[in-house]
Amino acid sequence: MAMKARPLRVLLVDDQVLFRKGLRSILSDWLEVQVVGEASDGSEAIAQAAALRPDIILMDVNMPTMNGIEAARRLRRRSPEVRLIMLTISEQDEHLFDAIKAGADGYLLKDLRPEVLREMLLAVTRGEAPLSPLMAKKILAEFSRQAPLVPAPKPTEDLTSREREVLRLVAEGADNRTIADRLCLAPGTAKRHIHNILSKLQARSRSEAVAFARHHGILSQEPTQ
């Protein structure tokens, strides 16, 4: 009999106690996740990471004493195995690229729905980099700005009408179960569509696929009958 996978060990880092406690309450309802500790600033996060050895650190960008950017930079050197996911309250946060340069593995808005956060955390176990769709779009735009003469890659194949429907729901933040329910699909079928979309768009994650599709106007195409 296959052994049951152990829960993801998560450390929460935020200077706002109410936010930390609310997030802990949400994560505690999920069997796949175990909150192993909390910290109120970057310095505490570094100490807790060394003591608790979490798999993932969910960390606020803006904190007193030591902010998330500096903490990420130091954690990347001291605990390279941990996955760092930054949290921000604003879509216009100017720290996005600083966080990525510091070694962050993902960048999410604090107001995302719990089911989307759950999907993003599970995506980390598959080696994906969780990014809010707007953040992924900003990164793609920055890459395009820095290398305007390099043509963007083209999809290896056109998406089917059903795959575009699935991708539109992914862009809305729907997880696999929601997609299956909305389109009257078996869960395995929805998952297979996601796999095909990532393959065709040469994307490593759902957010990257959405950013790519928006950039190339794929989401604006009307489904064929």
Image: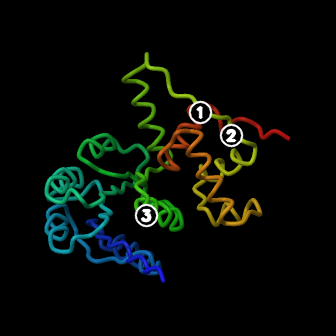
Name which residue type carries label 3: Leu
Closer to the camera: disc 3 or disc 1? 1
CB within 8 Å, label 1 to label 2: yes
Name which residue type carries label 1: Pro
Tell me where residue 142 appears, x and y as whole percent.
Answer: 40, 30
Looking at the rendered structure, the secondary structure element under dot 2 is loop
* Residue at horizontal 43 percent and vertical 53 percent from the top: 128
Closer to the camera: disc 3 or disc 2? 2
Name which residue type carries label 2: Leu
Image disc number at residue 126 = none
Position of the C terminus by quadrant: top right
* Residue at horizontal 41 percent and vertical 50 percent from the top: 90
- For the view shown, which residue lies furthest in the right direction? 225
Determine the CA span between mark 1 and mark 2: 9 Å
Residue indicated by mark 1: 155
Q: Earlier in the sequence, mark 3 or mark 1?
A: 3
Looking at the rendered structure, the secondary structure element under dot 3 is helix
- For the view shown, which residue lies furthest in the front direction? 1
